[in-house]
Amino acid sequence: MRERRLHEFAFLLPWLGVFLTTPPTILALASWSRAAGFPVFIVYIFAVWAMLIAAAFLLARRLPWSDERQGADAPLSGRDGANG
């Protein structure tokens, strides 16, 4: 059950990124205020970007490799495994 939830989160993570970076969401933050000398929406964009990268990295480490992926990384050989 846990693996299924990880797969569901892996599916939803890009959509979360799309939602967090859509113009209506960004325009809600697009004000003249500044954080550390930068406009708030620029800080927001880079913070969301960094969090998405970190979440994808952690998620990729926790997801198990499927059999298809392991087979794709194996060296090419004959169908029966012989090097002929």
Image (cartoon, grey):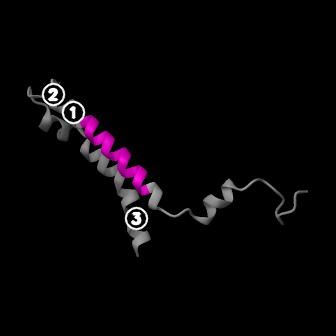
The secondary element bearing badge 1 is classed as helix
Farthest residue toward the front?
Answer: 36
Amino acid under disc 1: Val
Query: Residue at point 41% right, 76% down?
Result: 1
Amino acid under disc 2: Ala
Q: In this rendering, which labeled residue sits more in front, label 1 or label 2?
A: 2
Q: Residues within 10 Å of mark 2 (few under 14, many from 20)?
A: few
Compared across the picture, whether 16 is left or right of 56 comes to left
Q: Which residues are magenta?
A: 45-59
Q: Residues within 10 Å of mark 1 (few under 14, many from 20)?
A: some
- Which of the 4 image quadrants contains residue 67? bottom right
On screen, residue 18 above or below 3: above
Residue 36: assigned label: 2
Q: Earlier in the sequence, mark 1 or mark 2?
A: 2
Return the residue nearer the eye: 37 or 29: 37
Residue 6: assigned label: 3
Query: Residue at point 71% right, 56% down?
Result: 74
Farthest residue toward the top?
Answer: 37
Compared across the picture, whether 10 is left or right of 33 comes to right
Compared across the picture, whether 35 is left or right of 2 comes to left
Q: In this rendering, which labeled residue sits more in front, label 3 or label 2?
A: 2
Magenta span contains residue 46: yes
Return the residue nearer the eye: 74 or 31: 74
Q: Position of residue 83 (x, y in %)?
A: 88, 57
The secondary element bearing badge 3 is classed as helix
Task: Quickly name the residue at label 1.
Answer: 43
